[in-house]
Image (spheres, rainbow, N blue to C red):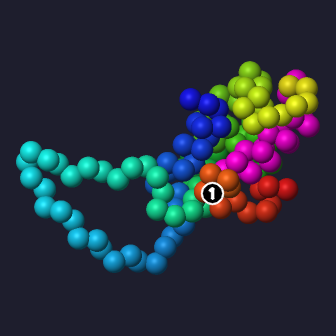
Amino acid sequence: MSIFGSIKDAIFGHKAAAKPAAPAQAAPQAPQTPAMPQMQQSAAPAGPVDVENVLMVFETERGTSDLNWRTSIVDLMKLVGLDSSLDNRKALATELGYTGATDGSAEMNIWLHKAVMRELEKSGGTVPASLKD
């Protein structure tokens, strides 16, 4: 799996990912039979994923308030449980089309953070402007 795919799966697959919605009417369920158990829903969220909210939940759950995930790609990767090594950031830069030097510079890391947020938004996430700029 790609590095970005792992980031996206970590955020979009989180139980608190979907924005709180108005109570939905319960859909009738087909009766279960022993021969055919009811299938669980796929991991796809029902609505847009509030990326900032999910990351704040991670921060609370994991006790990682010292991470600067709002601007740091290294801290963002750590928050979602990924290896933030230079090799992984180089791989992420390649995936996302970074054309500069992949030496771990501040320029590369800032670009990566913004690119990840843009890609999360393209994938159905709600990302506030403060995380994209």
37 vs 10, nearest the viewer = 37
Q: Quadrant of residue 75?
A: top right
Say if residue 98 shows up in the picture. Answer: yes
Residue 112 highlighted magenta (yes or no)? yes
**Residue reaching furthest to the left:** 34
Give the x, y percent position of residue 123: 62, 51
Dot 1 corresponds to which residue? 125
Residue segment shown in magenta = 103-120
Tell me what residue is drawn at x 85 percent, y 41 percent.
111
Q: Is residue 26 above or below residue 50?
A: below
Quarter of the N terminus within the rendering: top right
Q: Is residue 96 above or below residue 19?
A: above
Q: Residues within 10 Å of mark 1 (few under 14, many from 20)?
A: many
Quarter of the C terminus within the rendering: bottom right
Give the x, y percent position of residue 16: 50, 58
Give the x, y percent position of residue 7: 62, 40
Tell me what residue is drawn at x 76 percent, y 40 percent.
73
Residue 111 highlighted magenta (yes or no)? yes
